[in-house]
Amino acid sequence: MSGDVLGQDPAELRRRIDTIKAHPARVYDVFLGGKDNHPVDRNAAAAALAAGPRGYLDVRHNRVYVATGVKPCMPSASCCPSPCPYPGIDGCGRHAPA
């Protein structure tokens, strides 16, 4: 199977999405106020908020960190050579010049 999802049948992709159990990316989407989630993901987010009512703030703060502190330092930016010697968003963010 190819890793290129654009070349795959949309019906096949929908069939492969498990909507019976929550997925961390979709729960993250719930906390960000997104629309790409399912009832099971919203239930998991509600349970997480019941355990830690301010937990959604971590997700939102992470989004701000990535948008303001890391995106400018992604491999295409001038502060990180391409390819970045520190793979991943966190890698380039930790090694960005001050």
Image (cartoon, rainbow, N blue to C red):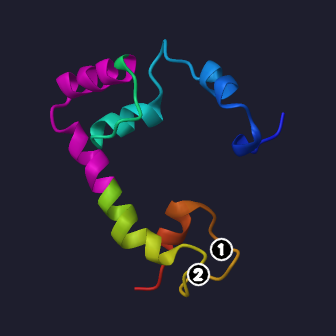
**Image label count:** 2
SS type, badge 1: loop
Instruction: Give the residue displayed 43% in from the left and 33% down from the top.
Output: 26
Compared to residue 19, the image places residue 1 above or below, namely below
User: In this rendering, would 29 be left or right of 2?
Assistant: left
Location of residue 38 (image quadrant):
top left
Numbered badge on residue 84: 1
Quadrant for the C terminus, please. Answer: bottom left
CA separation in Å, label 1 and label 2 = 6 Å
Q: Measured from the top left, where is residue 18 in percent x and y?
A: 56, 18
Q: Measured from the top left, where is residue 49 in percent x and y?
A: 21, 28
Q: Dot 1, how many residues are within 10 Å of its Cα: few (below 14), some (14-19), or many (20+)?
A: some
Query: As rendered, which of 69 and 85 lies closer to the eye?
Result: 69
The stretch in magenta equals: 40-62
Numbered badge on residue 39: none
Quadrant for the N terminus, please. Answer: top right
Q: Measured from the top left, where is residue 24 in percent x and y?
A: 45, 32
Q: Measured from the top left, where is residue 13 in percent x and y?
A: 65, 28
SS type, badge 2: loop
**Residue type at the position of mark 1:** Cys
Query: As rendered, which of 95 and 24 lies closer to the eye?
Result: 24
Query: As rendered, which of 50 and 76 lies closer to the eye?
Result: 76
**Residue type at the position of mark 2:** Cys
Instruction: Give the residue displayed 44% in from the left and 21% down from the top.
Output: 22
Residue designated by label 2: 80
